[in-house]
Amino acid sequence: MNVNLLIIDPQNDFCDIPGAALPVTGADGDMKRLAAFIAGHGSALSSITITLDSHASVAVERTTFWAAHDGGEVPPFTVITLDSVRTGIYVPRDRSLLPSVTGMLEKLEQRGKHQLIAWPVHCVTGTWGHNIHTALSQQLNAWEFARQTPVTRVLKGQYPLSEHYGVFEAEVPHEDEEATKFNERLATDLLRNTDLLLIAGEASSHCVAASVEQLLGYAMGKNLRLPRMVLLRDCMSAVTGFDAAERGFFERAGKHGVERLTANEVAELLD
């Protein structure tokens, strides 16, 4: 049986540990349980793929990009709407980017999926916050050594003028930016010859949800066979205040046959 593990954004800045920029309550425990699962059952895993939220310190989805109408700072978690930008409530600090940002917000609202949120600066590429949670990183290294096979690491979010929750595609793809377009190779690699696809990571309300739904949408659009898909429910948590988004995701995924099991329950399947 080919068992593949997809881990979404298991990074320090998303874990509820000292120094984290955008801690998700429960994430530290999630990653420790995931590390223990790999330590005990890594030999059953055919591949491991990890996504890494990877940003500059200034980008459209973070507070450093925006200013209030009076030039003041924009608080974290502020929702930036097209109307609020058009009326000057919030403006890019670099005013030359206003046309690009307005165009992006128009497309985002047309898609009707997510609003743009000004998040705290997090997962800046090359920083401690961008690194993989220590306990998990140690087990990934051990798995690579035992299998003599590299973990696949996929960076997302490098284009500064579009949010990028799901690993497969930015919220608003840009025609001139390949990294924002749908990553068909990654999707097919995860689906091809896979009997069981395990999914864990942070956060279930945002990047996990977006990634899974993008993959489901791709498979259905291409009429591809879906492997058995299981969310490791005790190896993911929602961003505080977004529990309803998590519940909505679980409900939608469940309608497509995606299961939710604990790491121990999956371990029993593999034994």
Image (cartoon, rainbow, N blue to C red):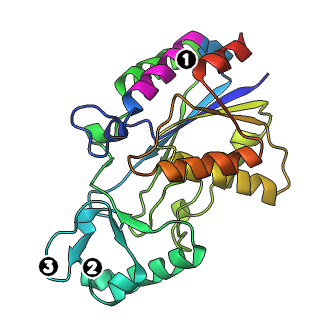
Q: Main secondary structure of the magenta part?
A: helix
Q: Position of residue 253 (x, y in %)?
A: 69, 47
The residue positioned 53% from the left and 20% from the top of the image is 144
Q: Which corner quadrant of the image does residue 133 belong to?
A: top left
Secondary structure type for disc 1: helix
Q: CA distance from mark 3 to mark 2?
A: 9 Å
Secondary structure type for disc 2: strand
Secondary structure type for disc 3: loop
Q: Answer whether residue 174 is magenta in the image.
A: no
Residue designated by label 3:
71
Q: Look at label 1 and name its amino acid.
A: Phe
Q: CA distance from mark 3 to mark 1?
A: 49 Å
Q: Look at label 3 and name its amino acid.
A: Gly
The residue positioned 57% from the left and 32% from the top of the image is 233
Tell me the number on the disc at residue 37: 1
Residue designated by label 2:
90
